[in-house]
Every structure is written in C-alpha cells, then in structure tokens.
Amino acid sequence: MSHEFPKVQGGGSLIVAWQVKDKHVLVVGGGEVAAGRILHALNADSRVTVVCPKTGLNDEVAFRVAQNQVSHIDRNFEPCDLDGADMVLCAIDDPEASSQVWKLCKERRIPANIADVPPECDFFFGSVHRDGPLQIMVSTNGNGPKLASIIRKKIANTLPSNTGAAIENVGRLRKKLREVAPDANEGPKRMKWMSGVCESWTLEELVEMSERDMDGLLKFYSTTKVPNLREVREDSH
C-alpha cells in the first residue's frame, strides 16, 4: 500500500510563486547581488526601497534610482528602515551588519534573505528563466547557485523560443472561456476542456491562434469536443 504514494524527500524547500505585487520590499545594499534582487522584485511589481550610500551603488542600481524605478535612502541601514517593510533582501559585504539585519527581521517577523548566508534566509533565490508569463526556477537549496544557473540554461535551451507567446494565448482563451461559461459549477468542465486544448494543440498552433480562432474554438466547448486548428478555421468560414 505504501508503495502507491510518492516518497518523502526531506531537505528541500517549499517552492511557491510569492505574490508581492504592491508590497514593500526593502533591499539593503547596492552592488551586483543587490541589483539582481532588485530586478526580481521589480519584475514581481513590488515597491522597492534601496538603502545604501550613493557611493556604493553599482551602475545598474544607480540607473534604477535615477529612473525612479526604486526609492533610495542614501546612507547605511538603520533599524527604522524596517518600518512598513513586507520583505527584506540584504546583500552587503559585512557579515556582522548582515546578521544584525537578520536578527531585527526575525524580531519583527519580516521574511528576509541574507545573501550567501543560507542559515539566515527564510527563502532562497533560484536561477530563473523568463519568457513573458513563463517563469521557471531552478533551486539547489543554497548548495550550488552556479550549478543552478547551468541547469536552468540547459532547460531553457530545450524550450521553443515562442513558448511565452503560446502561454499568453492560452491565458486569453481561458479568460474568454470564463466569460462564456461563468458558472462556478462549470469549473471542472472548463479545466478538463482547457487541458484537452493544451494537450492536443502544438505550441506552434497555440502561438498562431488568433482572436477569431479563439472565438471559433469556444463554440465547441458546450459539446466538450476539442477540435484542431484546421477544424476551427474550416468551421469559421
């Protein structure tokens, strides 16, 4: 009986897509690592504040400050900087100061990541491949960041270059389907039908799918049939 279930593999992380849109992310530091953290936070539509002396900002962080993409506090970190923070990303070359940031975050129960110090992290950053709405993260749970990057590139190289566009079209189709069949009781049927579309259509067909194709495809939903692209276009003419 026990062999029917997945084996538990301890030592991992709970990998989730953390929604930080409009949340306040505090970044301590302004070097290369901080620049990467800032980009991740901005890509997730969060509000970012960088605390670091102006002289310590690298070119990328200085650019984001100049473009008002982030707020900037021109000095070293102070405890009051944590006021109103929903998340803290610390990337400075001072182990003692970093640990102090960590301790203050723990006291205030603010989730934090202290770069290059796994024991002082509530979460890790993985190596991320991004293509429009598609995000693929590879994590080594703090054991080998460079290896995570190598593996991520290998995975990305196996994907068609238009994968993101296919996903965007699927997202639009799902939205249209909810408008056609808004009843909550339709949920299982909608999911099964959308799964059928994703499994039977190629990525190239999903990329090629136009708004007219979507409307034509949705005409088949009530019958539960999943036609191919050729059938949809023949029916539309």
Image: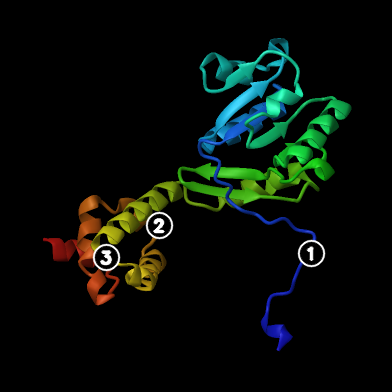
Q: Residue 232 or 176: which is nearer the viewer?
A: 176
Foreground mark, 2 or 1, reads: 1
Q: Earlier in the sequence, mark 3 or mark 1?
A: 1
Q: State the residue at coordinates (52%, 22%).
A: 69
Q: Earlier in the sequence, mark 3 or mark 2?
A: 3
As measured in the structure, the alpha-carbon distance from the residue carrying label 3 to the one carrying label 2 is 25 Å
Foreground mark, 3 or 2, reads: 3
Q: Earlier in the sequence, mark 2 or mark 1?
A: 1
Q: Which mark is residue 97?
A: none
Residue 79 vertical placement versus 7 (above, below): above
The residue identified by callout 3 is: 181
Q: State the residue at coordinates (85%, 33%).
A: 99
> Horizontal and vertical percent for residue 75?
72, 14
Q: Residue furthest bottom?
A: 1
SS for tag 1?
A: loop
Q: State the residue at coordinates (70%, 39%).
A: 110
Q: Amino acid at mark 3?
A: Ala
Q: Residues within 10 Å of mark 2 (few under 14, many from 20)?
A: some
The residue identified by callout 1 is: 10
The residue identified by callout 2 is: 203
Image quadrant holding the C terminus, namely bottom left
Q: Amino acid at mark 2?
A: Leu
